[in-house]
């Protein structure tokens, strides 16, 4: 047998050798309790204990308010408030644009640039009606050209890396 195999067998045998752990009262030498252990049992118990501690810690952090003390986590109340404020700011922006348009129209009437008969609040607000801008998602010619160039460069890099890997394997 080889020397490595002998070492493995000796190590395996040492893992399963029974040992006794005895706790004695120092004054009376009375045995309080004792255990029969081997290294494998100690290793398994230590591993399971570590896994259990990790799971308990993860559970405590994930499902309790303690996670708010970890940098990068924010409270659910803070997220809810941020969402509400974003919605309010959007609606206030729309209302502000409508009011500005209405005031400009009134100023035109007061300065005499617009006849009073043509002035109607509803017509002004309907002409200003703020809608989401239509976004053209179709790619432009320049974008298509850029995509083709990037695709060609990626093909060149892939083929050169494949050739390089093959040449490296041949050298080994």
Image (cartoon, rainbow, N blue to C red):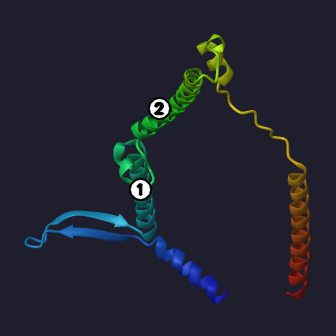
What residue is disc 2 on?
84
| Callout 2: SS | helix
Which quadrant would residue 53 be assigned to in this image?
bottom left
The foreground one among 78 and 102 is 102
Quadrant occupied by the N terminus: bottom right
| Callout 1: SS | loop
Which quadrant would residue 6 be assigned to in this image?
bottom right
For image coordinates 31% across by 64% down, the residue present is: 35
Q: Residues within 10 Å of mark 1 (few under 14, many from 20)?
A: few
Q: Say which label, 1 or 2, has the lower sequence index.
A: 1
x, y percent for residue 102: 57, 23
Classify 88 as above or below 57: above
**Image check: 137 left or right of 36?**
right
For image coordinates 45% across by 62% down, the residue present is: 47
Give me the C-alpha separation between circle 1 and circle 2. Answer: 23 Å
x, y percent for residue 9: 57, 78
What residue is disc 1 on?
71
Which quadrant would residue 23 be assigned to in this image?
bottom left
For image coordinates 64% across by 20% down, the residue present is: 114
x, y percent for residue 100: 55, 29
Q: Which mark is residue 108?
A: none
For image coordinates 90% across by 75% down, the residue present is: 160
**Image check: 33 left or right of 145?**
left
Figure label count: 2
Classify 43 as above or below 107: below
x, y percent for residue 49: 40, 58
Quadrant occupied by the C terminus: bottom right
**Image check: 33 left or right of 42?**
left
């Amino acid at each position: 047998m080889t020397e490595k195999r002998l070492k493995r067998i000796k190590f395996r045998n040492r893992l399963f050798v029974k040992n006794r752990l005895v706790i004695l009262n120092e004054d009376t030498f009375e045995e309080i309790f004792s255990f029969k252990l081997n290294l494998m049992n100690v290793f398994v118990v230590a591993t399971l204990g570590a896994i259990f501690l990790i799971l308990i810690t993860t559970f405590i952090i994930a499902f309790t308010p303690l996670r708010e003390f970890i940098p990068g986590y924010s409270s659910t109340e803070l997220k809810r408030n941020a969402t509400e404020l974003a919605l309010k700011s959007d609606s206030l922006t729309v209302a502000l644009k409508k009011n500005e348009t209405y005031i400009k129209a009134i100023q035109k009437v007061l300065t005499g640039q617009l006849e009073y008969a043509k002035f109607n609040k509803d017509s002004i607000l309907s002409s200003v009606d703020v809608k989401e801008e239509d976004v053209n998602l179709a790619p432009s010619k320049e974008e298509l050209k850029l995509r083709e160039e990037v695709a060609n460069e990626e093909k060149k890099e892939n083929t050169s890396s494949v050739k390089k890997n093959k040449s490296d394997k041949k050298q080994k």
